[in-house]
Image (cartoon, grey):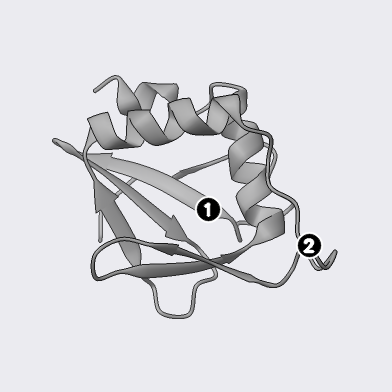
Amino acid sequence: MPGLVWQKSSYCPEGNSCIHIATTPGTIHLTESSDPTGAILTTTPATFGALLAALKTEPAPTSRDGNDDAPLRLRSANTVVTTTRRKWNAFVLGVQAGEFDHFAAR
């Protein structure tokens, strides 16, 4: 989506490869900058706010096999964004620090 201003967590490692969030009137967009499909999940601010609330009460998930670079898939009805557990955990830490609260307040 051209023209979107994307934000990533300050907990993301160096470089831009991480989960990014952007907004348009009435919608929130989530993507993984290194996802080869270029998929973008779209939701409402209320639904995104519910996700933020849930992530703030739960610890960041850990991998069972210790492989934090294994693929992790985020799904909506017809869209799949592929990331890694390490990048998801960086996003969750940013959520827990309040870095994305302004998106849900729209």
Please say if 3 is above or below 93.
below
What kind of residue is marked 1? Ile
| Left or right side of 14 for 57 | left
**SS for tag 2?**
loop
Number of numbered callouts drawn: 2
| Left or right side of 60 for 27 | left
Residue visible at 75% across and 52% down in the picture: 62
Image location of residue 69, percent across then percent down: 74, 68
* Residue that badge 2 annotates: 64
Considering depth in this image, is 76 or 42 the residue closer to the camera? 76
What kind of residue is marked 2? Arg
Q: Nearer the viewer, mark 1 or mark 2?
A: 2
Residue visible at 57% across and 65% down in the picture: 83
Image location of residue 92, percent across then percent down: 60, 39
Q: Which residue lies furthest to the bottom in this view?
A: 36
* Residue 19, numbered label: 1
Label 1: few (<14), some or many (≥20) within 10 Å?
many
Image location of residue 4, percent across then percent down: 29, 49
Please say if 30 is above or below 45.
below
Q: Earlier in the sequence, mark 1 or mark 2?
A: 1
Mark 1–mark 2 distance (CA, rounded to whole Å): 21 Å
Q: Residue furthest right?
A: 66
Label 2: few (<14), some or many (≥20) within 10 Å?
few
**SS for tag 1?**
strand
